[in-house]
Image (spheres, rainbow, N blue to C red):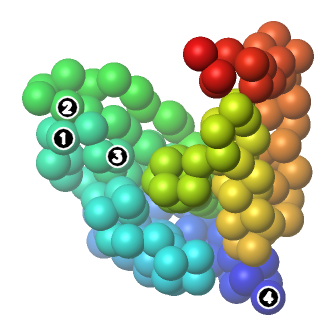
Amino acid sequence: MLSATLEAVTHAVQTKAGEPDRMIARLSRMRTEIERLGRAIGASADLLPTYEVSEQTGRPHIESEGSEFHYVVTERGTEFERFRARSADDLLYRVFHDVTFSMAMMREVKQRIPGDDCRRQIWQFQMAMLERLNPAWASRCGIEKEAILREHPFNDRAMNV
């Protein structure tokens, strides 16, 4: 199961890395795991982050700083987002939350159901992919979606306009 390998990688990358060589090794192990999980769900390489250096296109990149990983989104010299992950699991969740969302949006556009709030299909497909990778991630994402729906319920009629 994917989560057993995830536990091994989580343990390996959570060691404190004070030296540049160890930080590079941590980042390399994380990259290997991200690529492995990406292949497991058929994610194209362009949906996965880059490492240490930004393309400046809005595509996320990952930095390793001390005991933390940073998930950073920059475009044309402006940093829009910096998520500090204190664990490998938090970083992997963040990466694959975004990757699966992008994949789900592309699928929904191709298979749109007229009259349905598009979030229904997007979130259903996203949750299914997260479940394949790690059931705990699917649960975590589900809790986040429930909070969104409390504030912004599905509105299928709005899609008929």
> How many labels sit on residues?
4
- Sooner in the amino-acid sequence: mark 4 or mark 1: 4
Q: Which quadrant holds residue 32?
A: bottom left
Q: Secondary structure at mark 4?
A: loop
Q: Which residue carries the number 2 mark?
A: 75
Q: Quadrant of the C terminus?
A: top right
Q: Amino acid at mark 2?
A: Glu
Q: Which residue carries the number 3 mark?
A: 60
Foreground: disc 3 or disc 1:
1
* Front residue of 129 and 84: 129
Q: Which quadrant holds residue 10?
A: bottom right
Q: Which residue carries the number 1 mark?
A: 57
Q: Secondary structure at mark 2?
A: strand
* Front residue of 154 and 150: 154
Q: Secondary structure at mark 1?
A: loop
On the question of residue 6 being in view, the answer is yes
| Looking at the image, residue 35 lies above or below residue 46 | below
| Looking at the image, residue 33 lies above or below residue 101 | below
The structure residue drawn at horizontal position 38% and vertical position 60%, both measured from the top left corner, is 47
**CA separation in Å, label 2 and label 1:** 5 Å
Q: Position of residue 154 (x, y in %)?
A: 80, 24
* Front residue of 157 and 125: 157
Q: Which residue carries the number 4 mark?
A: 1
Q: Amino acid at mark 4?
A: Met
Q: Position of residue 13 (x, y in %)?
A: 56, 69
**CA separation in Å, label 3 and label 1:** 8 Å
The structure residue drawn at horizontal position 42% and vertical position 31%, both measured from the top left corner, is 82
The structure residue drawn at horizontal position 66% and vertical position 46%, both measured from the top left corner, is 113
Q: Amino acid at mark 3?
A: Pro
